[in-house]
Every structure is written in C-alpha cells, then in structure tokens.
Amino acid sequence: MNEKEVILTLDGLKKLEQELEQHKSVKRREVAERIKQAIEFGDISENSEYEDAKNEQAFIEGRILTLEKMLRNAKLIDDVDIQTDIVSVGATVLIKDMEFDDEIEYTIVGTAEADPINNKISNESPVGKAILGQKIGSTVEVNVPAGILKYKILNIHK
C-alpha cells in the first residue's frame, strides 16, 4: 500500500505530536471514564450517555490512527530546504492581487498544516499550486470557482 507523504514544517510536526499525545493520554482516559459512568446507570440499550461516549471513543480512536499515519509518513521541511529565489513549500510569499490591488502574505505548507485563517495555504490549493516554483516578479493566473484571479509575486522569504 502506497501511503501519501505528509509535508510538515517543524512547527506542524510538533502540533501533530502534541495532539496525538493529548488524545492518547487525556482524551482516551476521559472517554473511558464517561463510558464507565454510563454503564453504572444501568440498561445501556436505551442509555444516550453511553451511546454518546461510545461515539466519541470511536472518533478519538480514529483520530489517533490518522495522526499516527500522518506522522509515519511525514516529510519534514527544514529551513535549509526553503528557497527564497523561487516559491517552495515552507516559504512565506508576499503576493499582490492585481484586481483589487491588495497585498497578501501566505506561508506555503503541506495540506495537513493548511490554515487559511492564519495565512497558511496548502501546496495543493489552487493558489499554492499556481505560485509554487515561481520567482519574484512573476504574475500567475489562478482558476477558482469565481473566475480567474491574477497575482504578482512581490517577495519570498523564510
């Protein structure tokens, strides 16, 4: 089975490791306690607390498996791998929206770390794909559901 590589920065790797540890050491214990309490209420066939706790347990175990798989397939992007002459994963890029004359700064990350609210966009997102490999001064067109967006790359840094 060929598992997909998960591209992570050091910060992203630490966050996934912390989430995994939290699920294994804290959340597992909490949900086990909830199940135990629900069983003490008696008949579990009509016990909504038991059902909720079992559903949460299934979610937590699924998330643990997902996190372990992501960490097993992690490819760490080190600062030395980040280029500043062309856009690469891990780089922070200042782009200008040519239609609205706005400047936006994005950090290009792997999909596991994408967080658009904090200006971290995936290398697989439409904008991420379009600007990867481009140089300062390049203008790119991005096809999005709303139409075509044009961006000019103003700066690339670590």
Image: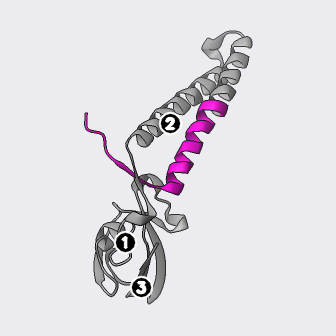
Image point (67%, 9%), residue name: 43
Q: CA distance from mark 2 to mark 1?
A: 33 Å
Q: Which mark is residue 96?
A: 3
Q: Position of residue 27 (x, y in %)?
A: 64, 32
The 10 Å Cα crowd at callout 1, few under 14, some 14 to 19, many 20 or more, is: some
Q: In this picture, which residue range is highlighted in magenta?
A: 1-26
- Whether 14 is drawn above or below 102: the answer is above
Q: Main secondary structure of the magenta part?
A: helix
Residue 92, picture quadrant: bottom left
**Relative depth, front residue between 21 and 98:** 21
Q: Position of residue 70 (x, y in %)?
A: 42, 42
Q: Assign the N terminus to one quadrant of the image.
A: top left
Q: Earlier in the sequence, mark 3 or mark 2?
A: 2
Q: CA distance from mark 3 to mark 2?
A: 37 Å
Residue picked out by circle 2: 63
Q: Does residue 22 show up magenta in the picture? A: yes
Q: Which mark is residue 83?
A: 1
- Whether 77 is drawn above or below 74: the answer is below
- Disc 3 marks which amino acid? Lys
Residue 155, picture quadrant: bottom left
Q: Position of residue 109 (x, y in %)?
A: 42, 61
- Whether 141 is drawn above or below 73: the answer is below
